[in-house]
Image (cartoon, rainbow, N blue to C red):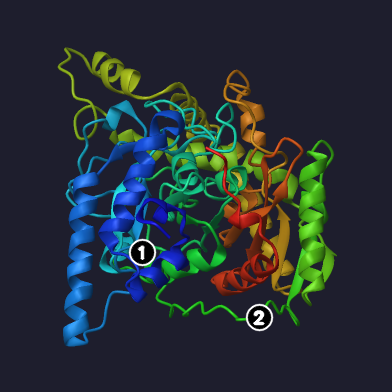
Amino acid sequence: MSANNLHELSLAQALAGLQRGDFSSRELTDACLARIDGLETRVHAFITLTPDLARQQADQADAVRARAKKTGEALPPLLGLPVAVKDVLCTRGVRTTCGSRILENFVPPFNATAVQRALDAGMVLLGKTNNDEFAMGSSTENSAYGPTRNPWDLARVPGGSSGGSAAAVAARMTPAAFGSDTGGSVRQPASYCGISGIKPTYGRVSRYGLVAYGSSLDSVGLFARSAEDLSLVFSQIAGYDERDATTLDLPVPSYDLPQAPDLNGVRIGVPKEYFIAGMQAEVEACVRQAIEQLQALGAQVREISLPHTEYALPVYYLIAPAEASANLARYDGIRYGLSEESETMLELYRRTRGAGFGSEVKRRIMLGTYALSAGYYDAYYGQAQKVRTLIKRDFEQAFEQVDAIACPVAPSTAFKLGEHADDPLAMYLEDVFTLPINLGGVPGLAFPAGFDRQGLPVGMQLLGGHFNEAVLFRIAHAYQMVTDWHTRAPAL
């Protein structure tokens, strides 16, 4: 493969090529940067690019690899591989805007733990990707820096809130990217963009340095072409972090993947509540065909029930905005964010919070503040937490019967830019199949399972028990060994 086409390599392929000496990290990085340069004006996947830093890190990786040939020293496992980072994760010396004007000039003095672990493993930072403001959205249209477009159809959304990362991987600008998932923000864009994405168990990956949206729901996730690619990075970023009290001090498995697509003995449940009236017929057909393929590989498939699924949407949109209301209170024009001289506190808020926050963020802050207010707390937020416990219990009972759950990611393929602009509820309904997983704290892995008649990707997700990401990697990898949906690229 010529140096000009290195961006087409998957993460695993790129790693193998670097290890063989087929090309250098600098050549791989330059190919990705050239790809970005050629497509960014059309796709708008990034908010901030770091080409000089990327080339510096790539040169350092090449120097380390060359020295190791002489000394025999062990190399970092992901040495020289490019990665992009969603702009809600702090990066030392590189601005982190959260897609908001209120943090337009914020440059963190530290790296998020997950980002630092990727850098320690040898990865090369290409830049910060676009996202819905403070990760609040399902389309990446809510970014203060303009929308990202879906590489499969530039008139459509890439999903959200991690749409920039998903679009960058789908457009072959980077072999891997970080995202965050509070209610489906990794899995839904992975589905819309025809790539793979994982949301881990709550507590498996440190959230230190992830700018908070809903603290009991937020997870740091990943995008890549395949389950194999995801497992390579995930194994490096997962694990306990003393700076995040929600991480558990549990051993991280190696996530080694089998050489043969054998799913004998794996029990897969199909929840009847995830196949609903009104969902796109082609989505249901692709997902059911994928489940049949898993069965053909030896998996035992049975129908199960997650009876409280119907309550997930209202529960989420009480809990998440309530936590957002508290988390975003810190952007007051004094300690964080925009700073304007004002004679009164009300004027200060108008010039900072009023000017710095977009309409969707304001909507969720107001909804959350109302749900937490005196006289309404027990009726709304308190009640939602009780129902959340029931949703979590549904998953726990299901995983006593099965090893994994297979279901759609979204009820439809990617919608057009602006299609839900005046209908927030329609936008929220796009996450109806992803929200329960965050409420239950369980892991989910999305991957492509076909295309609709318009040539748009259809995604499927696998759900696992707490801290059982390994079974998700195994099942998805087996499926991708006998299908080629994940290898297809948009014609840009």
N-terminal-most mark, 1 or 2: 1
Circle 1 sits on which residue?
A: 245
Quarter of the rendering containing residue 122: bottom left
Q: Is residue 222 left or right of residue 441?
A: left
Residue 215: where, in percent of width, then height? 43, 49
Disc 2 secondary structure class: loop
Residue 2: where, in percent of width, then height? 39, 57
Quarter of the rendering containing residue 461: bottom right
Residue 10 disc label: none
How many numbered markers are drawn? Answer: 2
Callout in the foreground (1, 2) = 2
Neighbor class of circle 2 (other Cα within 10 Å; few <14, some 14-19, many 20+) is few
The quadrant of the image that shows the N terminus is bottom left
Asked if 173 appears above or below 147 in the picture, the reply is below
Neighbor class of circle 1 (other Cα within 10 Å; few <14, some 14-19, many 20+) is few
Q: Is residue 416 left or right of residue 65?
A: right
Which amino acid does the dot numbered 1 rest on?
Ala
Q: Is residue 301 left or right of residue 383?
A: right
Residue at screen point 60% across, 81% down = 259
Residue at screen point 59% across, 30% down = 156
Which residue is more in the foreground, 218 or 176? Answer: 176
Task: Give yes or no for contact between labels 1 and 2 (Cβ–Cβ under 8 Å).
Answer: no
Which amino acid does the dot numbered 2 rest on?
Ala
Which residue is more in the foreground, 184 or 21? Answer: 21
Circle 2 sits on which residue?
A: 260
Whether residue 188 is visible to the viewer of this picture, yes or no, is yes
Residue at screen point 37% across, 33% down = 99
Disc 1 secondary structure class: loop
Instruction: Kindly report the distance in space between the C-alpha atoms of the residues bearing marks 1 and 2.
Output: 38 Å
Residue 368: where, in percent of width, then height? 49, 33
Q: Is residue 275 left or right of residue 77?
A: right
Residue 309: where, in percent of width, then height? 73, 50
